[in-house]
Image: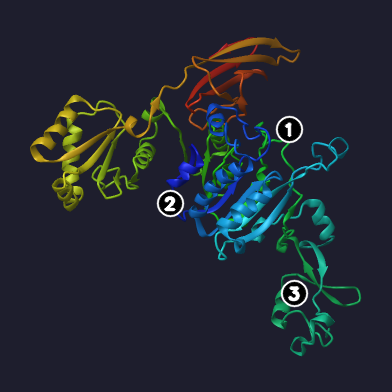
Amino acid sequence: MNQLILGDCLEVMKGMESESIDLIYLDPPFFSNRNYEVIWGDKGEIRSFEDRWSGGIDHYIAWLKERVQEMHRLLKPTGSIYLHCDWHADAYIRVYILDKIFGIQNFRNEIIWQRTRNPKGSQFEKKNLGIATDTIFWYSKTLNYFFNELSAREQLQNGELAKKYPNFDEKGRYYKGPIIRGPSMGLRPNLVYEYKGFIPKDYGWRMSKEKLIELDNKGDLGWSSSKKPFRKLRPINDKGNPIYNFWNDINRLYSNASESIGYPTQKPEKLLERIVLLSSNEGDTVLDPFVGGGTTVVVADKLKRNWIGIDQSVQAIKVSEMRLEKQQDMYSAPFSVILHKYDYDTLRYKNAFEFEKWIVERFDGIANIQQRGDLGMDGRKRDGTPIQVKRSDNIGRNVVDNFHSAVMRYDKNLYEKNKKNAQAVGYIIAFSFGKGAVQEVARLQNEENVIIQLVTVEEIVPIAKKPNLSIEINDLGADAKGIREIEFIAKTDVEVEFFGWDWDYVEGESFKAEVLLDKTGKQTKKFKPGTYTIAVKAIDFEGLEAIEIIKLKVNGVVELQ
């Protein structure tokens, strides 16, 4: 299951299975003399980072090292880690963290990313050179690591294609390549043969006669005006430009970029795409323990990788969620968001099968992927003890009766063993239980020595109340073409972290935010005459969200539908 997890990555990673991750990219808070790492500014982030630098560079390195040690444990033997940093601590990170944990023999590259050609600062003001680069250290877990440089190569663009492939024939573009061996390649008498009246010198052809005939039949053998043969090399066989450790072809994001979300240290998707393609396959699992603006998980999702993103900041998790929702389609893999608290309404009325799987996993169980022939069991604990989930309130005695009968048939030996050892023979998870269910569970334990444990959802995950949200609209008038400007004001009963706006919401589909980080709750937008469905989300400090959907008819006036 792809997951966005709110929390300290150290604690989250401690609960993850060893050697379960194929690729890790981390862009941890950079070490500097100011609170540069407090970007979102929400309570979770500030609380986490407020005293991190009190011990200077040694404190920072100790903090990061502890987390990288967990990452090393999580990586598969074929896995790689890419650690993104800058000049403030790059030397310390390599020597005291990466070399010590991964070993010098597993150092693969120091990648220099030229993120800008116009760095801030000036040698005239500071008497030094402007900083235009970041460092990305690449280490593998072992020498048996996965690497696919060809998949990450940059393909030639139109201008480059025209320059490299200037010739045309009926099959398209080509350039003239050698088909005869050169003197430096040595004598090859076995490759000296006649073809269409031409016999090369003692160095011979570059291929056997059979392959030459095959090449000719494909239309990829040419002849010059002087009757000398050449090979027609075409773009379809071009493997692209090789990648070196100096990356100067990917600029940092500017505020007007289509993928920009207003996050100050947001990395471009192209950067993460290159890393993901270099060191993972489709179906592999990618981890970003400092998910930030969500670029890693967004790219991993597009490239059909599984992924896990972790962050202390509610805003980081929820903005990443909205970015993922925006690109979701019918072929996208599902993902879950794990918060400190959950909204009752969202859980209570979520898709039944998704909820069953999700709550079983939160209960440290294994979900049942079958939906038929499972005797109503939705999962099991690690020891095999069955779990049933009821996405309901006030569960009655009949549920307990039916569950007890099913448990005896589900695994008779396990049932008798648990009964003999005075352990639970099964678990029922629900939002609440009625008096009859509670009494029947007590009777079974007292009279038959059978323990069935009733577990409320709130015992597994804390539940809170989401904010109330309402939208006020003000018609600001129309221009000469009848295009009206409308002001939207979002109002809530509690303080929220931010708002998101979807100006073309389709009911039944995911929320696709066009405005991601609205801190004020106020937006103005121009509308041509027509009918519009608009959705607004309010995100509170716990990550709980409320959504309000309004339908507008814009003509001579603005009307709510």
> Cα distance, mark 3 to mark 2?
55 Å
Which SS class for mark 3? Answer: helix
- Residue at 70% across / 53% down in the picture? 111
Q: Can you give x and y, in whole percent of width and height, for residue 239 in the image?
A: 71, 62
C-alpha span from label 3 to label 1: 50 Å
Q: Are marks 3 and 2 in contact (CB under 8 Å)?
A: no
**Quarter assignment of residue 200:** bottom right
**Closer-to-camera residue (64/498):** 64
**Mark with earlier residue (1, 2):** 2
Count of numbered marks: 3
Residue bearing the label numbered 1 = 256
Tell me what residue is drawn at x 34 percent, y 40 percent: 363
Q: Residues within 10 Å of mark 2 (few under 14, many from 20)?
A: few
Q: Residue at x 60, y 57 (%)?
A: 99
Query: Could you tell me the amino acid type at mark 3?
Result: Asp
Q: Position of residue 103 (x, y in %)?
A: 58, 60
Q: Which residue has dot 3 on it? A: 216
- Mark 3 Cα-neighbour bin, 10 Å: few <14, some 14–19, many ≥20: some
Amino acid at circle 2: Glu
Q: Is residue 134 left or right of residue 284?
A: right
**In this orientation, does residue 198 appear?**
yes
Residue 17 has which mark?
Answer: 2
For the N terminus, the image quarter is: top left
Q: Is residue 2 visible?
A: no
Marks 1 and 2, how far apart at CA: 41 Å
Nearer to us in this view, 513 or 224? 513
Q: Residues within 10 Å of mark 1 (few under 14, many from 20)?
A: few
Along the viewing direction, whichever of 490 and 43 lies nearer the viewer = 43
Q: Residue 114, image x and y in percent?
A: 76, 47
Residue 541, compared with residue 94, is above or below; it is: above
Instruction: Decide if residue 528 is on the left or right side of residue 128.
Output: left
Q: Residue 25: x, y in percent?
A: 59, 48
